[in-house]
Amino acid sequence: MKNPPTAYEDTEFLKSDSCREIRLQLEHLHPDVVMRKHEIESTIVLFGSARIPSPEEAAKRTDSNIARLTPFYEEARKLAKLVSGSEHVVITGGGGGIMEAGNRGAKEAGSRSVALNITLPFEQRPNDYVDEELCFCFHYFHMRKMHFLQRAKAICGFPGGFGTFDELFEVLTLIQTGKVEPMPVILFGSEHWKRLVDWDYLAECELISPDDLELITFCDTADEAWETITSFYQDA
């Protein structure tokens, strides 16, 4: 009889309920160690729908409503190129759509970028533009979101579904309550976001403070967003 595997080699044990705390710790520790190794200290977060097609894909889907959102893909791609010329590093969720655009723009600019992928019941694989050594896969959403914010200097939200709303409102809550340092929260597509959420109505109902509206900046182009980010830190 050969020796059984050591505890840290026993995959079945590590995946058991008893080891959940260990898995959580590892999901924090591994990306943190790797990013420190690569001296990544300041990131710009790009998030939005994985469904928004690239121009190449949109050309094949002319009958699809979502193809009309392709200009946001291009703005995310442009913003990533602007970020890549600075001390900041682009970080995305590593999937398709807006996430792909962010990693793609960084790669086209000759810069590295970070990808925080997630295991899902349906297939999600890293896009073709991620840096392999800076691509991480998470099981726990909250650990993934923690890494999005750990080095973030700005949050750039593009149109998206439930996941995008989840990420956006958690960030706003953390800034509003002082759990994280203030930073630009930029929403691409002024008309889109103001149609989705009646932000002024929330303030009128006194569900948020009028000052809370200042936590959000609406923009329509990558140049506007980059100007907002650079101005914020010049004035700080």
Image: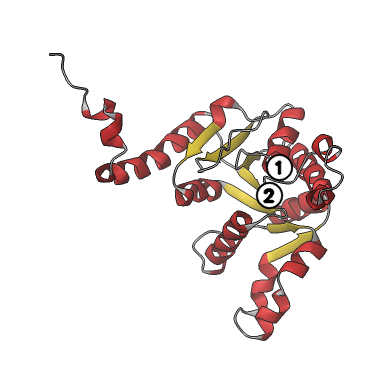
Q: Identify the secondary structure beneath mark 2.
A: loop
- State whether residue 204 is above or below residue 173: below
In the picture of the structure, the residue carrying the numbered disc 1 is: 97
User: What residue lies at 44% left-to-right and 33% top-to-bottom?
Assistant: 33
Relative to the observer, which residue lies in front, 83 or 68? 68
User: What residue lies at 69% left-to-right and 29% top-to-bottom?
Assistant: 111
Residue type, label 1: Gly
In the picture of the structure, the residue carrying the numbered disc 2 is: 49
Question: Where's the C terminus, which quadrant?
Answer: bottom right
Most distant residue in the top direction: 1
- State whether residue 132 is above or below residue 182: above
Q: Is residue 87 left or right of residue 55?
A: left
User: What residue lies at 70% left-to-right and 81% top-to-bottom?
Assistant: 201
Cβ–Cβ under 8 Å for marks 1 and 2: yes
Residue 109 appears in the rendering: no
Most distant residue in the front direction: 63
Looking at marks 1 and 2 on the same chain, the residue that comes earlier in the sequence is marked by: 2
Image location (x, y in percent) of residue 123: 56, 37
Q: Is residue 8 left or right of residue 4?
A: right
Residue 210 appears in the rendering: yes
Q: Which mark is residue 8?
A: none
- State whether residue 124 is above or below residue 5: below
User: What residue lies at 84% left-to-right and 50% top-to-bottom?
Assistant: 68
Q: Is residue 8 left or right of residue 76?
A: left
Residue 14 image-quadrant placement: top left
Q: Identify the secondary structure beneath mark 1.
A: loop
Image location (x, y in percent) of residue 25: 35, 42
Mark 1 vs mark 2, CA separation in Å: 6 Å
